[in-house]
Amino acid sequence: MTDYEKIYNFENLYRAYRKARQGKRWKGAAAKFEVNLLEALNLLSYQLKTKKYTLSPYNTFEVYEPKRRVVMSNSYKDKVVQHSLCDNVLEPILTRSFITDNYASQVGKGTHYGLDRLQEFLRRFYRKNGIDGWILKGDISKYFYSIRHDVLKTLIRRKITDPDVLWLVEMIIDSTEGNVGIPIGNQSSQLFALLYLNNLDHFIKEKLGIKYYGRYMDDFFLIHEDKAYLQYCRAEIEKHVAAIGLSLNNKTNIYPLRNGVDFLGFHTYLTETGAVIRKVRRRSKNNMKRKLKKMRGLVERGKIITATVEQSYKSWRGHAAKGNCYHLIRRTDHYYNRLFNSKEAEKCQKH
């Protein structure tokens, strides 16, 4: 079976459909697709096989947490195709060359993995150098909106040789106007974004010789004992990303290690005794409270059910539990129970 055949294989498309429907079965598009499931999957398979498949227009909207972003969401049938493409071809091929400390959107990795690696790096650094060191905290400006199509295609062609897969991949890349920017809402965009900075990862680890380095999408850190060397590294990184159409944003800076670092929703820092402390960032705490209050209104208007709220809160709570946040979790539990306990909901809404 060729790589392209894996994408339109019926069993793979069915598995892709099951993934695409997770958390979305109540939506109209998902329900409509499911009513004629066998027919819809057979049609998708035929369209892909004969290259008559085309992308539907995107649904564009804005989100404001954790920051303002324009999201381009694809249609349900396109989500199914993206799952099949990513799970069966892109992820197995593209991730082979990724460094261990590329944390986002990969099986077995994620935010908690990245936080644990940062913690291990801090402990290793302390054993060798104590608390006196420096950290370069970097971020790419408007990352997804700045990725160049021509550069991305070149990177992909070095990894994928199947011409039919390239036909589908390049159709997806060129689904937005111009030569710059990929849709945040596409599953494939996550893998494309990981690949786009893969060469930078290897450059930092192998050419600059930084042992303590990690990246989550466009958010990265370098830890070193010499501030001057990190200043040199920053200049080299700026040149490297400029060559592929990117730039570092104004939040990129070098800080004393004893100040700690904001990474993946936590402020992580070393104590004088070498203990690593991890606290949920204030913005994350405030965002969760605002989200719960908004969800209360949606529940009252019948837009969502309480099970959806519970799932969202459990996810945040599990994230917070990865830090030294016992008292924060207790306070937020109290707020949650007040907000969604019918006897006290009215009183809570006044706060």
Image (cartoon, rainbow, N blue to C red):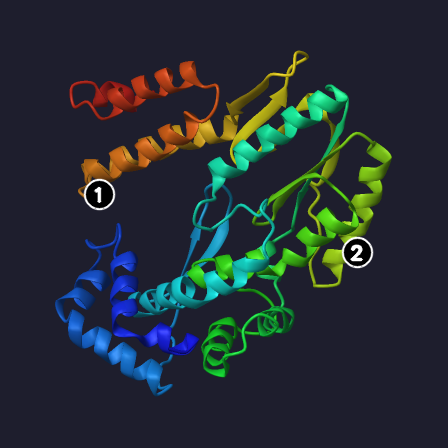
Please state which amino acid type lies under the numbered disc 1: Ile
Give the x, y percent position of residue 135.
72, 32
Q: Nearer the viewer, residue 75 or 244?
A: 244
| Image depth: mark 2 or mark 1 in front | 2
Determine which residue is flagged by label 2: 239
Q: Residue at x 74, y 41 (%)?
A: 210
Give the x, y percent position of residue 9.
30, 74
State left or right for residue 46 relative to residue 216.
left
**Does any portion of residue 86 appear in the rendered image?**
yes
State left or right for residue 308 relative to residue 3.
left
Please state which amino acid type lies under the numbered disc 2: Lys
Q: Secondary structure at mark 2?
A: helix
Determine which residue is flagged by label 1: 304
Alpha-carbon span between mark 2 and mark 1: 47 Å
Q: Nearer the viewer, residue 119 or 17?
A: 119
Q: How many marks?
A: 2
The residue positioned farthest toward the left in the image shown: 35
Q: Does 137 appear above or below 280?
A: below
